[in-house]
Image: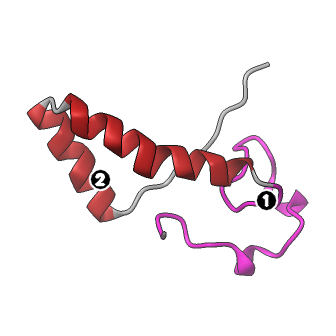
Amino acid sequence: MARSWGLSIGESERIDLERIVMDKDQEAALVFLKDVIYPKIKEAEKPGSCFHETSKPVEQLERPVSRHKKLGSK
């Protein structure tokens, strides 16, 4: 069964992504994937990460929600 993961980006990252798509900038797209998306995916794979598997209920996380990173923050 394939996993589904949630990913959050900040406003500046969203603007960068919009520019990349509008400009059809393949080089910038690869940089965006390597520097923004990939690190967030790796963070999501860590145990207890706030970027958790979307099918996993929040109540089952090891630490309280108040200690999670704010989504979209670096």
- At which x and y percent is residue 8? 49, 54
Q: Which residues are magenta?
A: 47-73
Is 22 included in the stretch rendered in magenta?
Answer: no
Check disc 1: other Cα within 10 Å, few if <14, some if 14-19, many if 20+.
some
Q: CA distance from mark 1 to mark 2?
A: 26 Å
Q: Which residue is mark 2?
A: 14
Question: Vertical placement of 45 versus 62: above or below?
Answer: above
Question: Vertical placement of 49 versus 35: above or below?
Answer: below
61 horizontally vs 43: left or right? right
- At which x and y percent is residue 67? 73, 80
Quick one: SS at disc 1? Answer: helix
Residue 58 is marked as 1
Outermost residue toward the left in this view: 23
Outermost residue toward the top in this view: 1
Q: Residue at x 43, y 43 (%)?
A: 34
Identified by mark 1, the residue type is: Val
Q: Residue at x 20, y 44 (%)?
A: 18
Question: Vertical placement of 68 versus 45: above or below?
Answer: below
Q: Residue at x 69, y 73 (%)?
A: 68
48 horizontally vs 23: left or right? right
30 horizontally vs 58: left or right? left
Quarter-wise, where is residue 55 in the image?
A: top right
Outermost residue toward the bottom in this view: 66
- At which x and y percent is residue 59? 86, 62
- Marked residue nearer the N-terminal end (1 or 2): 2
The quarter of the image holding the N terminus is top right
Nearer the observer: mark 1 or 2; the answer is: 2
Identified by mark 2, the residue type is: Arg
The chief SS type of the magenta part is loop
Quarter-wise, where is residue 19 in the image?
A: top left
